[in-house]
Each structure stands twice: as structure tokens, then as C-alpha cells.
Image: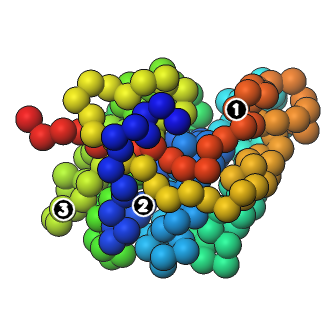
Amino acid sequence: MRHAIGARPVDPRLRWLILSPHPDDETLGAGAVVSEAAKAGRLAGVAYLTDGGASHRLNSDEQARLVHVRKSEAKGALRHLAGRRAPLPIHLDWSDASPETAGSDLFESSRRRLGALIRRRRVTAIAVTALNEPHCDHQAAAELAYLCAADAGHHVSVFEYLVWSGEPAARMAAYVTGGMQVGVRRRALARHRSQLTGLMGEGFRLPRGRLAMPSKDILFRKLKP
């Protein structure tokens, strides 16, 4: 974990909202955050930005089934990561690979929905994919997270996690979580069968190299100007 050198430990007092662009990003990039926060009773929620329906080229009926499957997979993965403390996943139902922009009806309704959760459950930290991630949905999730934090009415820190980027953006401080129990993240990822196997036919397959995941997460927070 090259970014862990010099990283500060994550503050155990934070109360977390995890924002994942697609079902499986929560495990790949923030699985240790989810697990650690749940164990401490400080996991306020896990929200999924998109329905994940663009991972395979399917007709409309098959795509609807894929969306249902991916939501079920997300629920199962969260149970592995968070155990009995797993919250029900929140699905914002954006179209996969076609992100909303600030001002659109769905973007603003998602912003209000997450804002209400942040205030009601006193969220103090959001973990989200990094702004410099190459996937448009990952970028949109970060944009939404920063706006929700600004709307909160109390201090909310935004921590970025990497899924596809090799490096964080410039001027970021690194933070490291505690370690997960061996095998938990791998079992959680295994629940996302549609992304790992031919369950839904030809389509996206997570590269085999991503199956070897670290026990800790590295998070990045913007440095103050």
C-alpha cells in the first residue's frame, strides 16, 4: 500500500456515509471503512449512485433483471462487510454511465435525499470515489458528495477513495483505516457475481488482479488552501 506511508489514522469518532457510484465500488474502495464504521456503530448509510445497468449490453427486459440482480448483490455484500449492523442500501437510481448534472431534477432530488440523511443521522464524514477517477459516474459521485457536505449545516469531511485511479489528485492528505478481518472483503466482493462471472452473459468482468485486495483502505482529503 504505497500511499499508506505517512498516512494518518482515520478518526474513530467520525460518523460515515459511503457513496458508491456502482454496486461493487463500496467493497473495492471503501470496504474497510464500511466494516470498521459498522463495528463501531458509526455507519450512517451506504448509498449507490447508479443502477449499474450498463455493465452488460442487454435488451430492456434483461437490463431490468440486471439492475435487480445488482441491487440484491449490493445488499449481500454489505452484510458481509458490516455484519448484523449492515444498513439497508440506499439506491439513487441514476442511469449507469449517463450521469446527472447539478440542477437536473434527479441530481437535486438526490442531493436533498442525502442531505436529509446527513442531518438526521448526524453524518460527519462522507467516503466517495475520487474526483480524478476516469469513470464519469465516479466523478459525478464526488461532485454530489462535496455539494451535500457544503449543504449540511454542520461540518462534514469528504474523503476520497480510489478504485481505478493509480494516484490521488495533488494537495491531498492521506488517511488509513484499521485492518479488516482476513477474507471479509473477498467474500463481500464474491457477492457481486454479475461483475465476476458470466451470470448475466457477456459484459464487464472485473480484472482478476483486483481480487487481491488490501485489508486497509487509504482515503484522501483535500488540504486547506
Crowd around label 2: few <14 · some 14–19 · many ≥20 (10 Å): many
Q: Which residue is mark 3?
A: 155
Q: Is residue 49 left or right of residue 211?
A: left
Q: Is residue 201 visible?
A: yes
Crowd around label 3: few <14 · some 14–19 · many ≥20 (10 Å): few
Q: Amino acid at mark 1?
A: Arg
Q: How many marks?
A: 3
Q: Which residue is mark 2?
A: 17
Q: Earlier in the sequence, mark 1 or mark 3?
A: 3
Residue at figure coordinates x 70%, y 32% from the top left: 210
Residue placed furthest toward the left: 225
Residue at figure coordinates x 40%, y 44% from the top left: 219
The quarter of the picture where the C terminus appears is top left
Q: Which residue is mark 1?
A: 210
Q: Picture quarter containing residue 152?
A: bottom left
- Foreground residue among 82 and 137: 82
Instruction: Return the x and y of residue 109 as percentages of the image width and height.
Output: 37, 53
Instruction: Return the x and y of residue 119 as percentages of the image width and height.
Output: 28, 71
Q: Earlier in the sequence, mark 2 or mark 1?
A: 2
Residue at figure coordinates x 67%, y 72% from the top left: 83
Q: Describe the colour scheme in one phrase.
A: rainbow
Instruction: Return the x and y of residue 44 as percentages of the image width and height.
Output: 44, 70
